[in-house]
Image: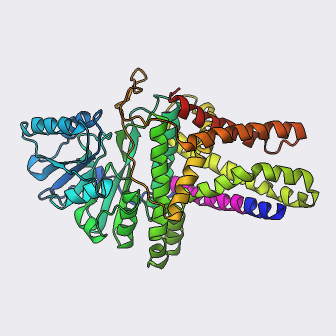
């Protein structure tokens, strides 16, 4: 049994090390590869008529932010006769009346805006987008979720990028309206900044597959149809369409210099729901698209990077195995001296920590403009690791459900119109009620790793002490906030 545990444990460590090496590769590409595309603002202006653009706004029960959204979209600078706005409303609450009133108000200002309401939310967001696409007039389709606030010149910065008929979509970088609202929002921004610098930037600069992020971007309508249209069989319909389009030969462009700000979730229940959807959707997309990637006529490096991209969320399976096997491995190390050579050799896995430290550091120093960033970064990095370890149970359940084929509904991430520290959200009607079974198990895991810490000290075995301390804090932090529903 000891040997089986060690095989699983070191196999999991090896998988995470390999994954981290591929991420490090993206960091090197990001730092030293030249951008494939000029900034759209630098491209020569084409003469002739501008293309017709449809802006789609998929909305489901977002009463706190929809007026802000429509007011912002109404300020988009583009010829009025070449622009239409589709409000795709699947709401079942008072959001509907707010939207109807606001749409009527904007129509009086000579804005071409259409209100489309579905009584059945078939296909969730993908279904709403597909339904709106059927009647859209635009050659290009710009998408914004309810919490995104694009700059007025968004279309002027992005539409010129479609200078090649095979460019299927343009994705911009997400900004964060409420980055400094709480510890939760800072840690979310810390993680998202990595995706929107190293991952998207690195992949795009090397010509690897990237993913559309569901919002703050534009699609060529013909690319959507050619790729098979929006499909609601995964929880990340944007990831799915991205890969189907690229496998059809369409190119996706990432514009890091164009930042579209949005609101980060402030409630832990919302954060966990968002993470659950992203993790499960990522695994579903691996199951759906990996065979197509492996058989595609693309370069080997594009193919292998695409597979690792599709497997991103599956890393949590190996992370959680390491978490749960850490104490049994500690006991084996203490009681089975015949494995001493193996444990000595395992010091190579310390490389993973240094690789990830470098990887996240590249993004942090790229985005952060704060004084004393060198002092702040280690703190953010450690807190982020603790936070993600605390979410590992929820995330591994999401990935496991995907691989087992267990279906679940699309749970949107509610937004509360929170930007400043003085803003309050605790009376928000969209807050999840009750305590989930996952939160209970997270609390039990926190107590378990507290016991591991005490046992390690008692046995004078300190190899896993810091790891177990992080697990105790991570699971305890998540569980406590799930019960109390407060944000620090």
State the predominant SS element of the stretch in magenta.
helix
Can residue 121 be seen here? The reply is yes
Relative to residue 109, is residue 277 depicted above or below? below
Q: Residue 331: image x %, image y %?
A: 85, 50
Q: Residue at x 47, y 29 (%)?
A: 180
Q: Residue 488: image x %, image y %?
A: 53, 26
- Quadrant position of residue 422: top left
Depth check: give the residue in front, 65 or 375: 65
Q: Can residue 469 be found in the magenta stretch?
A: no
Depth check: give the residue in front, 128 or 74: 128
Q: Residue at x 48, y 35 (%)?
A: 434
Depth check: give the residue in front, 321 or 361: 321
How many marks the image carries: the answer is: 0
Left or right: 350 with respect to 40?
Answer: right
Span highlighted in magenta in the image: 11-31
Outermost residue to the right: 337
- Quadrant position of residue 36: bottom left
If the image is split into quadrants, where does the N terminus sit? bottom right
Q: Residue 204: image x %, image y %?
A: 43, 60
């Amino acid at each position: 049994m000891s040997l089986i545990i060690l095989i699983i444990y070191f196999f999991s460590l090896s998988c995470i090390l390999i994954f981290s090496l591929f991420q490090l590769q993206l960091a090197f590409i990001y730092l030293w590869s030249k951008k494939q595309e000029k900034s759209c603002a630098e491209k020569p202006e084409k003469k002739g008529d501008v293309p017709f653009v449809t802006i789609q706004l998929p909305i489901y029960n977002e009463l706190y932010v929809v007026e802000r959204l429509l007011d912002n979209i109404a300020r988009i600078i583009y010829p009025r006769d070449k622009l239409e706005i589709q409000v795709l409303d699947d709401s079942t609450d008072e959001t509907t009346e707010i939207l109807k009133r606001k749409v009527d108000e904007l129509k009086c200002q000579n804005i071409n805006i259409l209100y489309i309401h579905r009584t059945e939310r078939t296909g969730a967001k993908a279904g709403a987008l597909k339904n709106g696409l059927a009647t859209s007039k635009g050659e290009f389709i710009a998408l914004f979720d309810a919490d995104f606030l694009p700059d007025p010149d968004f279309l002027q910065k992005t539409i010129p990028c479609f200078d090649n008929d095979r460019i299927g979509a343009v994705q911009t970088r997400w900004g964060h309206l409420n980055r400094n609202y709480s510890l939760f929002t800072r840690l979310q921004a810390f993680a998202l900044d990595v995706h929107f610098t190293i991952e998207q930037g690195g992949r795009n600069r090397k010509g690897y597959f990237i993913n559309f992020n569901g919002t703050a971007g534009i699609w060529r309508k013909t690319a959507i149809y050619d790729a098979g249209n929006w499909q609601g069989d995964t929880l990340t319909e944007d990831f799915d369409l991205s890969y189907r389009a690229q496998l059809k030969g369409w190119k996706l462009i990432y514009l890091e210099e164009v930042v579209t700000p949005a609101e980060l979730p402030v409630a832990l229940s919302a954060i966990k729901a968002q993470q659950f959807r992203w993790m499960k959707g990522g695994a579903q997309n691996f199951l759906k698209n990996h065979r197509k990637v492996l058989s595609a006529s693309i370069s080997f490096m594009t193919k292998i990077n695409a597979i690792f991209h599709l497997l991103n969320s599956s890393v949590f399976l190996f992370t959680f195995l390491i978490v749960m096997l850490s104490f049994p491995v500690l006991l084996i190390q203490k009681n089975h001296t015949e494995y001493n050579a193996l444990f000595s050799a395992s010091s190579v896995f310390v490389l993973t920590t240094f690789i990830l430290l470098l990887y996240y550091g590249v993004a942090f120093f790229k985005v952060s403009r704060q004084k004393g960033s060198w002092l702040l970064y280690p703190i953010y990095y450690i807190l982020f690791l603790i936070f993600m370890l605390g979410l590992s149970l929820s995330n591994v359940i999401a990935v496991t459900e995907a691989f087992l084929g267990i279906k679940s509904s699309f749970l949107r991430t509610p937004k509360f119109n929170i930007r400043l520290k003085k803003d309050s959200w605790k009376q928000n009607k969209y807050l999840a009620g009750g305590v989930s079974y996952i939160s209970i198990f997270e609390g039990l895991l926190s107590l378990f790793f507290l016991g591991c810490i005490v046992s390690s000290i008692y046995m004078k075995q300190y190899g896993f002490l810091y790891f177990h301390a992080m697990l105790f804090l991570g699971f305890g932090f998540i569980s406590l906030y799930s019960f109390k529903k407060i944000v620090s």
